[in-house]
Image (spheres, grey):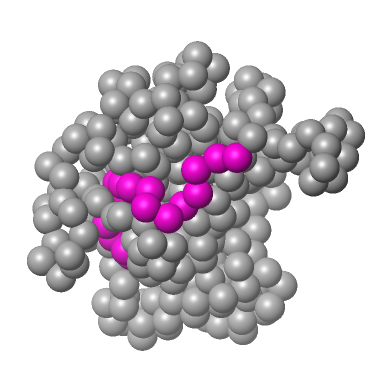
Amino acid sequence: MKPTIFLASRISTAFREQLASCATLVEAGVPGFADALDALCESQRNAIGIIVAFGSVRMPNTALDRLPRLGLICCLGSGYDGIDLAYAKQRGLWVTNSPSANAQSVADLALGLLISSVRNLPHARQYLEAGRWQGNAGERMQPVRGLTGRKVGICGLGAIGLHVARRAAAFDMEVGYHSRHARKDVAYRYHTSILALADWADVLVVALRADASTFHAIDAKVLQALGPEGYLINVSRGSTVDEVALIEALTTGRIAGAGLDVYEHEPQIPAELFQLAHVTLTPHIGGSTLEAAHAQEAGVLANIEAHLAGQAPLTPVPL
């Protein structure tokens, strides 16, 4: 008898076909994890043994309680912040992720947001749309400081942060970082706190894992330390930045600009952010490349195959 997999996130047609070859698929028909389970009949819920979803999908414990045969939760991507790991441990559930599968893709977008921010590309488009550019002989935008020699501070030198550091170094930028511990395998400047890193940096790139310890790690004090010529780039999770403090810092000139791929209350984005010409916004697409998707899907399949064979998953999340 085939196992039953609950697809709590949208996946590609090709990946769906791969999963269907080894399991019976049940797909979420409405938004919201708990509501999607409510929409299923009891026999479907009782059959679900595996969940496949993006790690940011909130899976309330009360909803998971309704899945008596559940044994494995596979997260697409490196994150797993939607899951209560203490609950999973207590219940004996395996939780897996796809570490490093999307790291290079997210790092690529981080550099894109960085370049867009410091080179003021959103304002450049507005400048063109307003018809202000009359060629090099007419009015020109004010020159800005380039990338070379800028100090880039990376919050979290994990897989994504390390790729950001390497890309920034290729632009002849000076790299510093803060992590829970200094890394012995890199020569980048280590800072003992995020506040110290922000005070040093021209650009602060957030690549932190989202959990209780990193909630609002980027707060008003950090933004004040970053300063009126500093830029914030966030490609981690929206919860790592105090969004209210960020908007205040942007509107009052306490920082120079920002590049954001993630938001505190996704998919809602504060209207104020759309009014700011010195902010670049993208809809959480850091890991949305074909290469990252294929790597994530391969990781999920490998974990499911191991689980069905009675073996430990290949990439379990520590519980």
Asked whether, in this view, residue 191 is left or right of residue 114, the answer is left
* Res 141 seen here: yes
Is the residue 74 above or below the residue 291 in the image?
above
Asked whether, in this view, residue 269 is left or right of residue 162, the answer is right
In this orientation, which residue lies closer to the viewer: 168 or 23?
168
Please state the extent of the stretch shown in magenta in the rendering. 143-162
In this orientation, which residue lies closer to the viewer: 292 or 6?
292
Residue 149 part of the magenta-drawn span = yes
Asked whether, in this view, residue 125 is left or right of residue 70, the answer is right
Residue 91 rendering spot, x and y as whole percentages: 26, 52
Residue 155 part of the magenta-drawn span = yes
Residue drawn at the location 37% of the way across and 52% of the way down: 149
Report the quarter where the C terminus lies: bottom left
Residue 170 rendering spot, x and y as whole percentages: 41, 68
Residue 279 rendering spot, x and y as whole percentages: 59, 34
Residue 302: name its quadrant: bottom left
Residue 56 rendering spot, x and y as whole percentages: 47, 47
Residue drawn at the location 68% of the way across and 78% of the way down: 14
Q: How many discs mark residues in the rendered view?
A: 0
Residue 254: name its quadrant: top left
Is the residue 124 above or below the residue 163 in the image?
above
Residue drawn at the location 46% of the way across and 52% of the way down: 147
Residue drawn at the location 45% of the way across and 36% of the way down: 231
Asked whether, in this view, residue 224 is left or right of residue 291, the answer is left
Is the residue 217 above or below the residue 168 in the image?
above
